[in-house]
Structures are given as C-alpha cells and as structure tokens.
Amino acid sequence: MKNLPKLIVILGATATGKTNLAIDLCKKFNGEIISADSRQVYKYMAIGTDTPVGVWDTECKIKSYIVNGVPHHLMNCIEPDEDFSLAEFKDRAIGIIEDIDKRGKIPFLVVYFGVSG
C-alpha cells in the first residue's frame, strides 16, 4: 500500500472563518492551502466568492496564489468560460498535495459548502 502524505482538512460553511484559521495554522505548522471551493477556482470572481486578495507566485514548480504569506492552490486559476470537472480537480489536488509533501510542508485542504435555509 502506498504511503499517503498527511493532509489536514478544514471543513465548514461559507463565511465561518475557515480561510483565516487555515492561514494561521499554515503559518504555525509550515503549510500550504488547497482551496476546494467550486467558485474560487475561477478567475475574476473575487467579489461574488469572497476570494481573499493575493498575488501570484510563479517561482514554484506549481504556481500558487499567495495570501498573507501563505500559498493557496486551485484558487483564482481557471478562466470563467473553461469547463473544470471534479475529476480534473482531484487530479490537480493530488499532484499539489504530493508536491507540498515532497517539500516538507503540510497540505491543508479547505472545503467550503453553502448553507441553504
């Protein structure tokens, strides 16, 4: 059986402070964030999705979106008119998790879900 990397998952409803918690934990434990938000993956959606303000770092093997000094992956990276499936997300996320682990860091998967009421 393949030895799997450690993965911390932060799961919660929209607008409950997951991103700030994840950033704080990543700073404390040398981590990077993989966003699992079906809307934040798209570019130009910052207002409608509350995407945090960041800058692109293209120096890494896998370019990342830096927010408060913490790399975020799978955020603000797909054109709005592009199709992006769950299978594509899974393939990219696995590659990113493996890359983060190889660099001796901890991957934090931040999973968002909406609340209907």
Image (cartoon, rainbow, N blue to C red):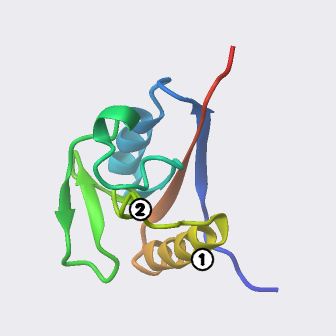
Residue 72 as seen in the image, left or right of residue 59: right
Q: Amino acid at mark 1?
A: Asp
Q: Is 52 or 69 nearer to us in this picture?
A: 52
Q: From the top left corner, tell me how far across and down residue 113 is, in percent.
A: 62, 36
Residue drawn at 36 percent across, 63 percent down: 79
Of 25 and 96, the residue lying toward us: 96
Task: Give the CA distance from mark 1 to mark 2.
Answer: 20 Å
The answer to which image quadrant residue 78 occupies is bottom left
**Residue 93 percent location from the top left of the image:** 54, 69
> Which residue lies under the disc numbered 2?
81
Query: Element under label 1?
Result: helix
Label 2: element kind: loop
* 53 w.r.t. 102: above or below: above
In the rendered image, the residue lying farthest to the front is 81
Q: Residue at x 54, y 66 (%)?
A: 84
Query: Residue at (50%, 23%) from the top-left corner?
Result: 16
Label total for image: 2
Does residue 57 lie above or below 108 as drawn? below
Query: Mark 1 or mark 2, which has the lower sequence index?
Result: 2
Residue 91's disc number:
1
- The kind of residue tagged 2 is Asp
Q: Is residue 28 above or below residue 115?
A: below
Quarter-of-image position of residue 105? bottom left
Q: Is residue 58 left or right of residue 75?
A: left
| Structural crowding at the residue carrying mark 2, measured as other residues with C-alpha within 10 Å and reported as few (<14), some (14–19) or many (≥20) | few
Q: Closer to the camera: disc 1 or disc 2?
A: 2
Residue with the most extreme top position: 117
Q: The C terminus lies in which quarter of the figure?
A: top right
Q: Are marks 1 and 2 in contact (CB under 8 Å)?
A: no
